[in-house]
């Protein structure tokens, strides 16, 4: 929600003290597009703490309006409509069992 300063983006890329306890370590954060009302970002995290992205943005006084997971590890999640599903192939099952 709203715009985000470059200093806030830099903070999100580093070690962030999370509201409610805990620390989020480095993340890749890239601004995709921005206007006065909202900013679209790409965020890559390397751990999976509970509500981590929302808590990271809360630490810089920003509210996440919409969050979409696009990958887990090397496993891309595209190609399905919201609420859609498909069966995994054997290679995908093996990958997920071993991450």
Image: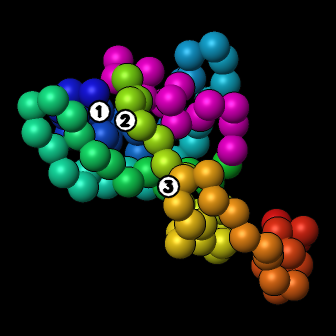
Give the image location of residue 40, x and y in percent: 28, 46
Q: Left of 48 or right of it: where is 44?
A: left
Asked whether the residues under the numbered discs 2 and 1 touch, taking CB atoms below 8 Å apart as contact, a structural biologist would say yes
Relative to 3, residue 61 above or below: above
The answer, for residue 6, to whether it is visible in the render is yes
Q: Left of 97 or right of it: where is 29?
A: left
Q: Which residue occupies the extreme left position in the image?
A: 36
Query: Which mark's residue is nearer the viewer, 2 or 3?
Result: 3
Of callouts 1 and 3, the N-terminal one: 1
Asked whether the residues under the numbered discs 2 and 3 touch, taking CB atoms below 8 Å apart as contact, a structural biologist would say no
Name the element at disc 3.
strand
Query: Tag on residue 11?
Result: 2
Q: Find disc 1 in the rendering and name its residue.
A: 8
Residue 57 found in image quarter: top left
Q: CA distance from mark 1 to mark 3?
A: 16 Å
Residue 90 found in image quarter: bottom right
Residue range highlighted in magenta: 48-62
Q: Is residue 97 magenta?
A: no
Name the element at disc 2.
helix
Q: Left of 88 or right of it: where is 6?
A: left
Name the residue: 25% across, 51% down: 31
Name the residue: 56% across, 16% down: 19
Give the image location of residue 55, x and y in percent: 53, 26
Q: CA distance from mark 2 to mark 1?
A: 5 Å
Q: Which residue occupies the extreme top position in the image?
A: 20
Name the residue: 57% across, 42% down: 25
Q: CA distance from mark 2 to mark 3?
A: 14 Å
Query: Which mark's residue is nearer the viewer, 1 or 3?
Result: 3
Q: Give the position of the C terminus as an image quadrant.
A: bottom right
Q: Find disc 3 in the rendering and name its residue.
A: 44
Residue 98 found in image quarter: bottom right
Q: Is residue 57 magenta?
A: yes
């Amino acid at each position: 929600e709203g715009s985000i300063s470059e200093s806030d983006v830099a903070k999100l890329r580093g070690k962030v003290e999370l509201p409610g306890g805990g620390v989020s370590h480095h993340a890749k954060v890239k601004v995709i597009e921005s206007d006065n009302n909202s900013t679209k970002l790409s965020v890559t995290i390397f751990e999976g703490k509970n509500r981590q992205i929302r808590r990271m943005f809360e630490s810089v006084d920003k509210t996440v309006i919409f969050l979409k997971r696009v990958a887990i590890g090397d496993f891309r999640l595209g190609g399905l409509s919201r609420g859609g599903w498909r069966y995994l192939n054997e290679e995908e099952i093996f990958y997920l069992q071993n991450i």
